[in-house]
Amino acid sequence: MTFNGVTLVHSSDLHIGDEETTRACGGDETLVLARVLDAARTVRADAVLLAGDVFENNRVPRTLADRVAGLLAGAGRPVVVLPGNHDPLVADAVWRYIARAAPDNLFVLGVTRPRAVVLPRLGLEVWGNPHRSYDDMAPLRAPRRRHTAFQVVLAHGHYEPVPDRRRRLRPAWLIGAAEIAATGADYVALGHWNRATAVAGGAVSAHYSGSPELSRSVNVVTLGGGGGPPARARVTRRALAFLIDGSLLDRRVAAVLARAVLTPSPPGGTIAGQKRKRFR
Ligand SMILES: [Mn+2]
């Protein structure tokens, strides 16, 4: 069986429920998710990958959880979710609640599947180790052997080229270049940093998508196509139309701002997210 190329939209760190994010979105808590799913529709993505911290925390009002579940159910394509350090799979995790009425297209690693999902129509496996507590863990431990045409990994944590795990002052969920390379995957979709960044991983492409609020973009990942063996993943960023200080900007303006936000701005700038730390 041969497969045509696969197009994936990768985002992370939406932090739904965070007050600052909600304010930046004119009070609409789910706008960030709606924008990400819009982008997936526009590029006709085969699937959406959300690499952790979709929610700011697990104390999510039921009405908000239901709205998120509704948006995910209406995505029109498979959505694969990795629980992160802000929304880990504790006993009363929001993802357990959402998965209870799981729409067919929603896959939550650690809930609807142990840690891998195969999308047979795409010839794609997506695996990842979900955060199950607030404690430290190694996001890329125990890589899975490839048994599908395409294989993608989700990981939520802090990249260091050569992690030093002797100093354990606080949880860092470290991800090293050698671990990325050892996955042998076509793409490693990273979460935890709020900026869109490519990191080194030997022959394996690994990128942070950044948070929609700060990066104002999603990663669009294309694998294979053209009938040959899977080539290295092609990764581009697609700007999101976005609300800034309550006003909806069109995509071209958002794209300019997406670039501007990566350069230092004067103190007291009004672009929401500018104040954000690089990761959290
Ligand atoms: Mn995080």
Image (cartoon, helix red, strand yellow):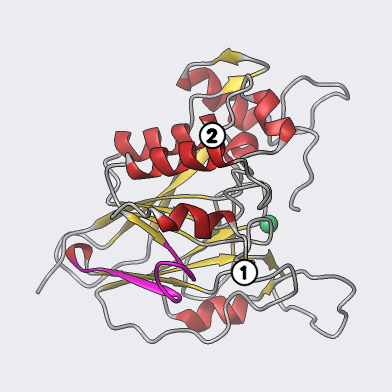
In the rendered image, which residue does mark 1 sit on? 131
Q: Quadrant of residue 162?
A: bottom right
| 203 on left or right of 140 | left
In the rendered image, which residue does mark 2 sit on? 32
| In-front residue for pair 58/265 | 58
In the rendered image, the residue lying farthest to the left is: 1
Q: In the rendered image, which quarter contains the N terminus?
A: bottom left
Magenta segment, which residues? Answer: 108-120
Q: Secondary structure at mark 1?
A: loop
Residue drawn at x 60%, y 66% as measured from the top left: 89
Residue drawn at x 73%, y 67% as measured from the top left: 134
Spatial CA distance of label 2 from label 1 is 22 Å
Name the kind of residue labelled 1 in the image.
His
Question: Residue 273: in sight, yes or no?
Answer: no
Question: Residue 74: in sight, yes or no?
Answer: yes
Q: Position of residue 277 (x, y in %)?
A: 79, 45
Q: Give the image quadrant in which the ligand numbered 1 is located.
A: bottom right
| In-front residue for pair 72/146 | 72
Q: Position of residue 201 (x, y in %)?
A: 55, 72
Residue 255 vertical position relative to residue 51 in the rendered view, above or below: above
- Determine whether the beta carbon of the residue marked 2 sits less than 8 angstroms from the nearest atom of ligand 1: no
